[in-house]
Amino acid sequence: MPVFYGTEIASPLMLGTAQYPSPADLSRAFQRSGAGVATVSLRREAAGGDGSGFWDIVRGLDIPLLPNTAGCHSAREAVTTAHMARDLFDTRWIKLEVIGHPDTLQPDPFGLVDAARILTDDGFQVFPYTTEDGILAGRLLDAGCEVLMPWGAPIGTGLGLNNPYGLRTLRGQFPDVPMVIDAGLGLPSQASQAMEMGFDAVLLNTAVARAGDPPAMAEAFAHALTAGRLARAADPMEPRDMAVPSTPVLGLAVLQ
Amino acid sequence: MKITVNGTPRDIAAPTLAAALDELGYGTDRVATAVNEAFVPSSARAGHALAEGDRLEVLAPKQGG
């Protein structure tokens, strides 16, 4: 199973906690999938708000929490949010998002590297939400990141792995770095494909939470990840252009 | 003293951040705080004096992806 900053997680499924129809759906999705990590956030709270109720639910999941800096558009904002998250969730893990554009939610590579360096120096263990860009990946590793989280497609789109060539290249360029496909997945088959390509885990939210039956979809993703991981380990055949009969030709009856 | 709490103007008497959270009703809620866009750890709230016009952010655990 994947190891992030020395911590082995129980499943390659990292699941978000937002947008579920109900808290019960959220809990059942985690139970049925056996997700290994839960992503969480922090937002403004009115006195007497429901923050405590949500905290009780996620603490009850009994799996590592990965707070995010979702919505931050500058390194400064992200760094401050990360510090508040560490205070709130009592973890050094931070899913670092520095968003470059509100429509695409594409990471801002410059702010991302700046924030990653500051946070690593402050003792954080950074999980950067990044693209498939190999140069950027190298800069993030130089900044101290020991995990990379390239996007499959823009957040919430469900388009799957938009750039398989770029992702394969990134995987090949840094074969020993734990990598998570973060965002853009819509179907379990896409998660399976990510594992077949050699990625270590996937992080998703909308594909499960917005499904008609979130717990069932979460379980489907878990099965797909198992299939993809087994397939990768089983060393898939090389594709070829020309047909090759699988049934022996030798011994074929002559009936003409 | 007039301050802003999560974007809303408030008038409080408490001199410190910890006392302000009590006065505002957060009590023992699990929250993280920033004053004037700078993080203030929970361990430093009792010693953090507030000033007129301070902008306080109070955040709690929320759903996230």
Image (cartoon, coloured by chain):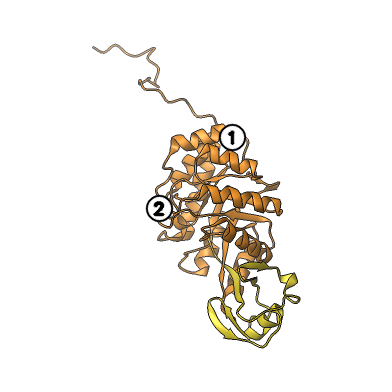
**Chain B takes which shade in the image?**
yellow
* Residue that appears at 45% across and 34% down: A165
Disc 1 marks which residue?
A: A174
Chain holding disc 1: A
Q: Position of residue A59 (x, y in %)?
A: 64, 65
Q: Is residue A47 left or right of residue A105?
A: right
Residue A9 higher or lower than B8, as above or below: above
Three-letter amino acid code of the residue under disc 1: Phe
Residue A45 higher or lower than A190, as above or below: below
Q: Quadrant of the C terminus of chain A?
A: top left
Q: Residue furthest front?
A: B52
- Tell me if residue A231 can be seen: no
Q: Quadrant of the N terminus of chain A?
A: top right
Q: Quadrant of residue A244?
A: top left
**Chain A takes which shade in the image?**
orange
Instruction: From the viewer's side, name the closer residue of A17 and A229.
Output: A17
Q: Position of residue A40 (x, y in %)?
A: 57, 62
Disc 2 marks which residue?
A: A157
Q: Quadrant of residue A173?
A: top right
Instruction: From the viewer's side, name the closer residue of A52 and B39.
Output: B39
**Is circle 2 on the same chain as circle 1?**
yes
